[in-house]
Image (cartoon, rainbow, N blue to C red):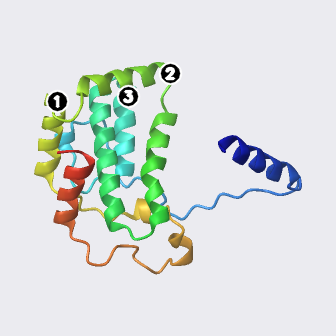
């Protein structure tokens, strides 16, 4: 079935006129960091630091070859982005979580990717000492306090409904954060 879909897509693309162009449109603020964060411990990350900011911090750790800190910042980036999917109404914007992961992994060489994977192994599974410590740290910090514009601007509604604030009505930050910690991070 996948092979058939690929063949159909390739056939469609080859039938397109040579003069056709693909345009990539980005709304201002799409996946945009708001702060320049260096390689720091997760304990030192304030609640106003966005996942896009954490991407820069994790990359900074990779440059310093501190893969354990890079991993924890990457996990925090993913955790906060997942939380943001609970409060951003536009489901197309939720792909920002995946896009940030791709942006991080695209910046890794084969060598650094291997070192990052070793950091994952050292971190361990749910219930490992590193996981328990990570959970303590992020639980103590409480829910993020930033406005998730990096994600809102990633979705289609940034173009079709630019006057909307993009948030889910009646969102309960504390409850959503607790559920995110429990269901996504297994804390």
Residue 174 x/y as whole percent: 16, 64
> Which of marks 3 and 2 precedes in the sequence?
3
The disc label shown at residue 128, or none: 1
Q: Which residue is mark 2?
A: 110
Quarter where residue 166 is shown: bottom left
Q: Residue at x 85, y 48 (%)?
A: 14
Q: Residue at x 74, y 56 (%)?
A: 22
Which marked residue is nearer to the observer: mark 3 or mark 1? 1
Which marked residue is nearer to the observer: mark 2 or mark 1? 1
Label pair 3/1, CB-CB below 8 angstroms: no
> Which of marks 1 and 2 precedes in the sequence?
2
Inter-mark Cα distance, 2 to 1: 27 Å
> Tag 2, which secondary structure?
helix
Q: Which residue is mark 3?
A: 62
Inter-mark Cα distance, 2 to 3: 13 Å
Quarter where residue 62 is shown: top left
> Which of marks 1 and 3 precedes in the sequence?
3
Q: Residue at x 16, y 34 (%)?
A: 127
In which quadrant will I find the C terminus? top left
Does residue 52 appear to the left or right of 11 in the view shown? Answer: left
> Tag 1, which secondary structure?
loop
Does residue 93 appear to the left or right of 182 in the view shown? Answer: right
């Amino acid at each position: 079935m996948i092979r058939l879909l690929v063949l159909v897509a390739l056939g469609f693309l080859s039938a397109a006129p040579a003069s056709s162009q693909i345009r990539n449109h980005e709304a201002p603020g799409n996946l945009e960091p708001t702060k320049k964060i260096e390689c720091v411990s997760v304990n030192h990350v304030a609640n106003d630091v966005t996942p896009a900011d954490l991407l820069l911090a994790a990359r900074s750790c990779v440059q310093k070859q501190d893969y354990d800190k890079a991993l924890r910042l990457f996990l925090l980036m993913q955790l906060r982005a997942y939380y943001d999917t609970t409060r951003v109404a536009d489901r197309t914007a939720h792909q920002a979580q995946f896009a940030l992961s791709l942006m991080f992994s695209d910046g890794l060489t084969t060598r650094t990717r291997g070192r990052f994977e070793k950091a994952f192994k050292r971190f361990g599974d749910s219930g490992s000492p590193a996981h328990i410590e990570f959970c303590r740290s992020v639980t103590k910090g409480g829910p993020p306090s930033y406005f998730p514009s990096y994600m809102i601007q990633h979705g289609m509604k940034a173009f079709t409904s630019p006057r909307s604030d993009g948030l889910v009505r009646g969102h309960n930050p504390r409850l959503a954060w607790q559920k995110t910690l429990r269901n996504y991070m297994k804390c």
